[in-house]
Image (cartoon, coloured by chain):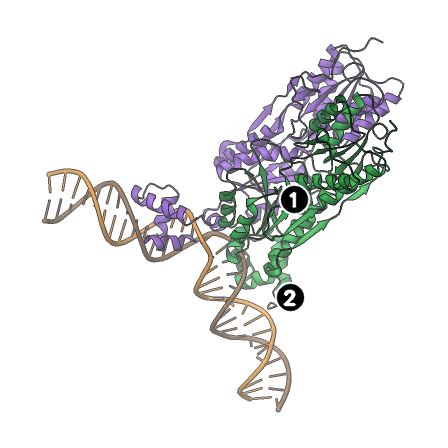
Chain colours: A purple, B green, C brown, D orange
Amino acid sequence: MNLKQLAEHLGLSQTTVSRALNGYPEVREATRLRVQEAARLHNYTPNARAKGLATGRAMSIGHVIPVSKKHEMVNPVFADFITGSSEVYTRAGYDLVISLVEDGAQEQRYRDLRAKGNVDGLIVHGPQRVDSRIDFLADLGIPFVVHGRASDMTADYSWIDMNNRRAFRRATQFLIDLGHRRIALINGIEAMDFAYRRREGYRAALENAGLTPDPALLFSGEMTEELGYNAMRQMLAAPAPPTAVVTSSIVTAIGVRHALDEAGLVMGRDVSLVSHDDDLSYLRNRAAVPVFTATRSPVRSHGALAAEMLLELIADPGSGPRHRMLEAELIIGRSTGPAPQS
Amino acid sequence: MNLKQLAEHLGLSQTTVSRALNGYPEVREATRLRVQEAARLHNYTPNARAKGLATGRAMSIGHVIPVSKKHEMVNPVFADFITGSSEVYTRAGYDLVISLVEDGAQEQRYRDLRAKGNVDGLIVHGPQRVDSRIDFLADLGIPFVVHGRASDMTADYSWIDMNNRRAFRRATQFLIDLGHRRIALINGIEAMDFAYRRREGYRAALENAGLTPDPALLFSGEMTEELGYNAMRQMLAAPAPPTAVVTSSIVTAIGVRHALDEAGLVMGRDVSLVSHDDDLSYLRNRAAVPVFTATRSPVRSHGALAAEMLLELIADPGSGPRHRMLEAELIIGRSTGPAPQS
DNA sequence: CGCCTTTTTCAAAGCGCTTTGATGGTCTGC
DNA sequence: GCAGACCATCAAAGCGCTTTGAAAAAGGCG
């Protein structure tokens, strides 16, 4: 059933029916009710494409997720992030379009997205320290919100980000306060902005305490379980293993824990561990006393906040770039304890 | 730049330009080249909504993902599955729309999706043993492919599924062959079809060997690390612990491994473990000799296959329901060994 | 009761594209 | 040199909706 049919059926013009359904005031209340009733009865839903054509708004939001052929991994936080966004979109009547775009074809894909006109705005994931996408999108003139930031860019743009630097500084400081001096960092890929900031926070805490970072205790890579396991094993086999470790993800932390288990060491006694915790749904660290001491920042709520910010930006494009900084919470779990006396 | 402008610019009619770009034969080759060149130069991309309106095809595919308020978890396989699908869509010029839909509003959401007309077909995730969505979608008359099956339904519909029953039968048989007699199963939620089939496979192998399943060795729940850990701990504390475990996911397997580590037991010697392995990108189990013995079935390729099937179905709706059964591969890793002599 | 204002409804244009049916132009072949 | 067959191109209708500008109906007031 389309508008025309519904209008004929009611003996009204399309105009009136359209207005009745879209809440315009120039239609009598009795008529509106009659129209709404009929619409419900016939399961009438306006065709989104026609509506979009007429209004110029697509009523949908794109999430662009970079995938590199090199390490062809989908960052597991996307799923939770998107879950958070999705609720906001649904409530506002927007659809969610996912674009996995490969390193190469970036610009063309964005241009197409824009020209094809099937999104009103974009959420950009996984920014690097220098990320050409940002300037490019700004030029295109499509509203967008970056999840994260690109440190080495000067342009102003809308973003929502966790305070990675502060979180990792705090985590490292916490370990220093416990008496640890040899503290390792197992980080994400440091071309990614978030990972870079985390290392900066880690370094700041060490330097603040008069400690020099030991390159032998620095690891970075895709945040897999394997990375944590291999890094920890390697460090345990070396002459001067760390007494504490900071990791960028619970998955990696699990790898570290396993290496410790295998070596007969007790996490929280022999080696302390603080992880970052995105609060992913299948890796909960939420026991009464959590397994891992962690800097927690639920990525799902980031998704919701980013979505809200983007919708506001679309509603009022002049309202300029918006920013939202989120602080992680330090959760004390069972994976940390005072530095062992040596 | 839109068609009209481009046509004016070229001194041609919209018809000719449209045909030139869409590869119709009734346009001279020289003209076609000239048009294509101009289109590229001006970054012309046809407006998808207008095109959709005119052709009646949305050129996009919806993935509907159920989220239950109760256990509000996004199954981590979705991310990888969608990555696989996405490549296929992109190549074919389709967009990917994600709909997270809550338990309650299912039918209305599907009806809307269809009436709004912004998807040409659907992929349905996470079917239960009885799943009303299937009959409903069939009634709606929109092409769809189910990832998985609904065992207790008689209707015929298109699906792609892993042979869960056979995989778990095989895994269990493998343990039996190694001399294990007390074999636990840590499964997903058994209202989900895949989990139900896995238990059936497990049971079939046991019964075939003249063993009776022990309810104390059966667990089921959201496939988290915690589930594996708690289940294994509980079994180790009980009078007659199992000598082998089958798990439904690597995440769960990791929990089991940790419980073993903690108890000072060696996986593969004291307790054997076979896991199902969806080959998720951040939980690779792909070392030369994998950590876990596993029934492997890469969910990413399922995503690609499902997408292909759906596109075929859209291209030729008459081609009737299609089915595709995939077999998991048994990968021998370091987590299994002969049953300990007791 | 008639004039003016307000309310309610409508016809038609337009969003950007595809596609049908028509129209000149250019070749063939006799 | 001309009918018939193609070729290349075009004008216009239509996809389903919103929205403008106009008209009809209803209400208010002296």
D2 shown above or below C26: below
* Residue at the top extreme, as displayed: A341
The residue that disc 1 covers is: A107
Chain identifier of the residue bearing label 1 in the image: A
Q: Are marks 1 and 2 on the same chain?
A: no
Q: Is residue A261 visible?
A: yes
Q: What SS does tag 1 mark?
A: helix
Q: What SS does tag 2 mark?
A: helix
Q: Is residue A266 left or right of residue A6?
A: right
A280 shown above or below A122: above
Task: Name the spot of residue B123 as percent of width and height, x first.
Answer: 61, 47
A88 shown above or below A286: below
Task: Name the spot of residue A128 as percent of width and height, x first.
Answer: 69, 33
Q: Is residue B8 left or right of residue B246?
A: left
Q: Is residue A28 visible?
A: no
Res B30 label: 2
Find residue B246 and report its image quarter: top right
Between label 1 and label 2, give the one nearer the viewer: 1
Q: Quadrant of the C terminus of chain A?
A: top right
Task: Name the spot of residue A83 as percent of width and height, x first.
Answer: 59, 34
Amino acid residing under circle 2: Ala
> Which of B307/A49 is in front?
B307
Amino acid residing under circle 1: Glu
